[in-house]
Image (cartoon, rainbow, N blue to C red):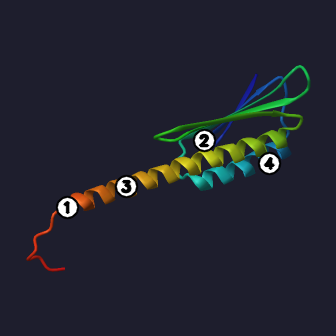
Amino acid sequence: MTVASVNNIRFMYKGLEIDDLTKDYILKRMGQVHKVIDKILHTEIEIDIDKKGKFRVEVMVKTPYELYRAENTTISIEGSIDSVVDDLKIQMTKNKDRRKTMLKRGARSIKKKTVLDENSRF
């Protein structure tokens, strides 16, 4: 098992070595995840190869509030990374939209409960 770190991204390889071109592709695709959510504490990318020659890619992204995780197994590392990044972006946008909705609902309920004096001016 090989472990390498770049900034706050940690790579773990089991049973294989990754060249710089593939690593750059992974970092480029993970940049899209970093655009969706700003406050990412650290990211772990685990890549291994199974007995059939397929690549399993697992990515865990830790933020202050949530832990996002996705994994996929395909015949190429790039295909697995693409699928995992798309899954992570879906999870993150869904959670982001849910938080916004909850904030709006909370604001509406406060507004409904607010009683204004008839003599007040706006």
Q: Residue furthest bottom?
A: 121
Q: Residue furthest left?
A: 119
Task: Verify CB contact (< 8 Å) between mark 1 and mark 3.
Answer: no
Q: Mark 2 sits on what residue?
A: 8
Q: Quadrant of the N terminus?
A: top right
Depth-wise, is mark 2 or mark 1 nearer the camera? 1
- Tag on residue 105? 3
The amino acid type of the residue labelled 1 equals Thr
Q: Residue at x 72, y 41 (%)?
A: 84
Residues at marks 4 and 1, CA–CA distance in whole angstroms: 53 Å
Residues at marks 1 and 3, CA–CA distance in whole angstroms: 14 Å
Element assignment for label 3: helix
Q: Mark 4 sits on what residue?
A: 25
Q: Which x, y percent locates residue 28?
A: 74, 52
Depth-wise, is mark 4 or mark 3 nearer the camera? 3
Q: Quadrant of residue 26?
A: top right
- Which of the two discs, 2 and 3, labels the residue nearer the N terminus? 2
The amino acid type of the residue labelled 4 equals Tyr
Q: Which x, y percent locates residue 92?
A: 58, 47
